[in-house]
Amino acid sequence: MMKLLSRTFACLLLFLTLSVSVQAQSNIQSPSEFLGYELGSQWTSHYKVMDYFWHIAETSSMVEAKKYGESYEGRQLMLAFVSDASNMSRLEDIRKNNLKRTGLLDGEPSADTTAIVWLSYNVHGNETSSSEAAMKTIYELVRPDNSETKSWLQNTVVVIDPMLNPDGRERYVNWFRQTVGEEFNAQVEAREHHEPWPNGRTNHYYFDLNRDWAWLTQKESRQRVAEYQKWMPHIHVDFHEQGYNSPYYFAPAAKPFHNAITDWQSDFQYTIGENNAKYFDENNWLYFTREVFDLFYPSYGDTYPIFNGAIGMTYEQAGGGYAGLGIQKPQGDTLTLTDRLTHHHTTGLSTVEISSKNADKLVSEFSDYYQTARNNPRSEYKTFVIKANNNPDKLQALFNLLEKHRIKYGKATREQTLGGYNYRTGETERIRVTEDDYLVSVHQPKGVMARIMFEPRPELADSVTYDITAWEQHYAYGIEGYALERQLEVEETFYSKEELDNTFGEPPYAYLARWEDLTDVRLLTDLLKNDVKVRFASEEFKMNDRMYGRGTLIIPRADNKNMGNGLTT
C-alpha cells in the first residue's frame, strides 16, 4: 500500500512539474504581443528591448540572461544564453570545457562538441534594425512549436547581445521620433532621412565602438570583451547597416585577409555564406559578397573574433540612419524597417542552423587553432621585447591592455645578445636583452593576438583596405623594444610600478611632474579638481643633472598655502 501511494505521489509530482513547465512555455509572448505593436512598425526603446529579453528568460527554460554592465549613460548591457534545456543545465560546464580547449583554463577538455555562436547587435547606434531583429530571433529560437530551431539547439549554445551601443541608439531613436510625422515620409528629401550631427552611430563619447574591440578605450568595450573572454565562441556575427541603396552583404569577406587567418576560417565563411544565400534566393532578396569589408585591421567585431580563433563575420543590411521607418529607393520600391529586421533575422537563424550542422568540425578546428598557437605558431617573429627602462606609466597602460586580452607576458630569464628588429630604427641589428626586460611570446594560447598586436610589418596583399594598416603597440605607446625571430624563455609575471618615495628632508620649494603621456593629463585633472594651483614650464630646463621638457607641471608650495600639509598627502 505504501509503495502504491509513493508511486501515485511521484506521478502526481511529475505531472504538476510538467504542467508548470508547459504553462510557463505557453506564456512566452512574441515581440509584437509583448510590445503592443507590430514589430517593425516603430522603433523599440532600449528599456523595452531589455524587458523583452528578460521576459523570455523568465518564461523559457531554454534561456538565461545576465546584465554584464552599463553604458556611460547608465543603460543596461545584457547577454542572453539560448540552448536546449539539457544544455542549459550544464551551461557552466560547456563554457569551462571550451576554455580548456584554448588553454586559457587548466585541465583536459572532454569530448563534448557543443558549438558556441555569438550574435552581436547594434554596435552602431543608428544602424537600428538589428536590435529589432534580435527580439524576433530569440523568439523563434524558443517558440514552443518551432521544432526546427529546437533541433539546432541540441548541440549549439547561442549567445545574444541585443544592443551593444544603447546610448547611440537612443540618440537616434529619440531624434527620429521628434522629427517624423504621424506617417513616415519615404521621400529621400524628407527631414527624417537627414540625421544631424552628432548622429547616433557612436557612443556617449562619440567613439566608434566597432573600432574598439582590441584597444578597449570605452567602458562598453571593456565590459563586453571581458564577457567574450569567458566564452571564446566559435562563431561571431556583428550585425550592421550600410547605404540604403545597397543589397545585403554577408560573408565571405573581401580581400585583403591578414595572413594569420587560417584556411579553415576562410573556407567556412563560404559555407555560411552559401546557407545565407539559399534563404535569400528563396525570397528573391538581393545580396552580395567579397566586394568590400576585408579582414585586416584587428579591432572590428569580425576581425577581433577571428584573431581569437572564431569565424568572425560582418552582416550589412541596407538602411542606416538614412532609412528611417521607410525610404524610397531609386528603383521605386520602399525599404521598410520590417524588411531590414527580417533580413537580419534570416541570416541570424541561418548562421545558427549551419553552425549546428557543422558543430563537430567547428569545435575540432577551434581546438586545432589553439594547439597550433601554443605549440607551432605561424609567425615570423616568436618573441617581442619591451625594454624595462621605458616610461613606467606607458608600460602600465600596455600591460593592462594585454591582461584584458589574456595575453601572457613576463621577464627574460637571462641576459643575452642576439639579432632582432629594432622598432625605433626600423632595422634588424644586434640587440641586448636584459633580465629586467619584458617579453611577449607567441607560444601561448593568445599567441595569434599577441602577434597581431606586435608584428612590425603586417603583410598587406592589396593596397586597398577598409581601414588603417598600422597599429603596432611599441609605436602606439611610444616605447622601445625589439621583435625576435627566436623563441625566448619567459618567466611569467605581472607588472607593477615602483612606489615613489615622496618623503623629503626639508619641505620642497615645488613639485615637478613631467608632461609625457595621458597619465599626466589625469594627474593634472585631479590636481585641478582638488583646487591645487599648477604652473607649467614654457621651455625645457635642467635641474640636478636632470632635463625637464616643455609642459612639465610645476606645483609651487607658495601657490598652495591654503592646502597646508594636504599637498604632500
Image (tube, helix red, strand yellow):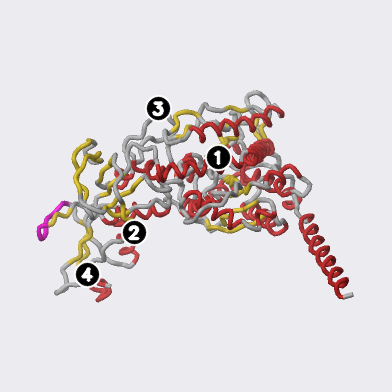
Q: Which residue is mark 2?
A: 494
Circle 1: element type: loop
Mark found first going from the N terminus, 4 or 1: 1
Circle 4: element type: loop
Query: Mark 4 to mark 2: distance in Å?
Result: 24 Å
On residue 195, which mark appears? 1
Q: How far across and how far down the image is residue 448, in percent?
A: 41, 42
CB atoms at circles 1 and 2 under 8 Å apart? no
Mark found first going from the N terminus, 4 or 3: 3
Label 4 or label 1, whichever lies nearer to me, is 4
Q: Which residue is mark 4?
A: 502
Label 4 or label 2, whichever lies nearer to me, is 2
Tell whether position 536 is magenta: no
Label 1 or label 2, whichever lies nearer to me, is 2
On residue 461, which mark appears? 3
Label 3 or label 2, whichever lies nearer to me, is 2
Q: Is residue 177 left or right of residue 5?
A: left
